[in-house]
Amino acid sequence: MIGYFGDIIFETSDQRILTFSGFKRDVKGRWEKHAVIGKKPVSEFSGPDLDTVTFTVNLNGSYGVKPRDEMERWAQYVSQGFAGVLVIGGRPIGDNLWDVQSVSEAWDTIFNQGELYSGKIDVTLEEYVEEIG
């Protein structure tokens, strides 16, 4: 197993391959600029911002996955406001949960009767902080 998010398991085996590519994590700070007459603004660090993670999930019917089912599962995460732990290599990414901000689907190969055989989804997750503290 490569990792998981909710009930989605990223893995490679002789029966199933569900992986991602282009994994990118952005860690940002929040900065305020205070105007000073006749001088450059003064910068003030106001705290960390929410991290974001983006990646592409490659889906192919040859590898034991049903691309349309996987796409629908991710779309449900978006519409239900799901937040969960993202684990890669046995280690959680970040200190908090992640919510699915957006999913973009690309349908590549469609067979007769409209069966989706291959495609990919671009996923954007944002750090989810449950409480002020």
Image: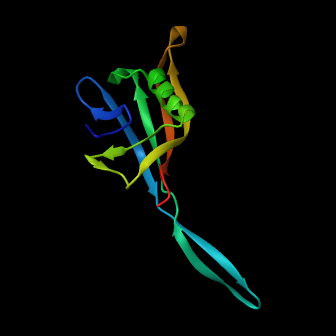
Residue 48: give x, y in percent of width and height.
50, 66
In this view, the residue farthest toward the bottom is 38
Which residue is at the far left? Answer: 14
Tell whether 14 sits left or right of 93. left
Question: What residue do we see at 52% from left, 9% from top?
Answer: 112
Looking at the image, which residue is at 55% across and 75% down? 45
Q: Is residue 77 above or below residue 25?
A: above
Residue 93: x and y, percent? 36, 52
In the figure, is residue 89 to the left or right of 125? left
| Count of marks overlaid on the render | 0
List x then y, in percent, for residue 74.
48, 31
Between 7 and 60, the one nearer to me in the picture: 7
Residue drawn at x 69%, y 86% as measured from the top left = 40
- Which coloring applies here? rainbow
Q: For residue 9, which quarter of the picture?
A: top left
Residue occupying the far top of the picture: 113
Tell me if residue 8 comes above or below residue 91 in the rendering. Answer: above
Image quadrant assignment for residue 16: top left
Q: Position of residue 94 (x, y in %)?
A: 38, 55
Left or right of 3? Residue 25 is: right
Quadrant (top left, top right, bottom left, bottom right) of the N terminus: top left
> In the figure, residue 43 lies in which quadrant?
bottom right
Q: Is residue 125 above or below residue 28?
A: above
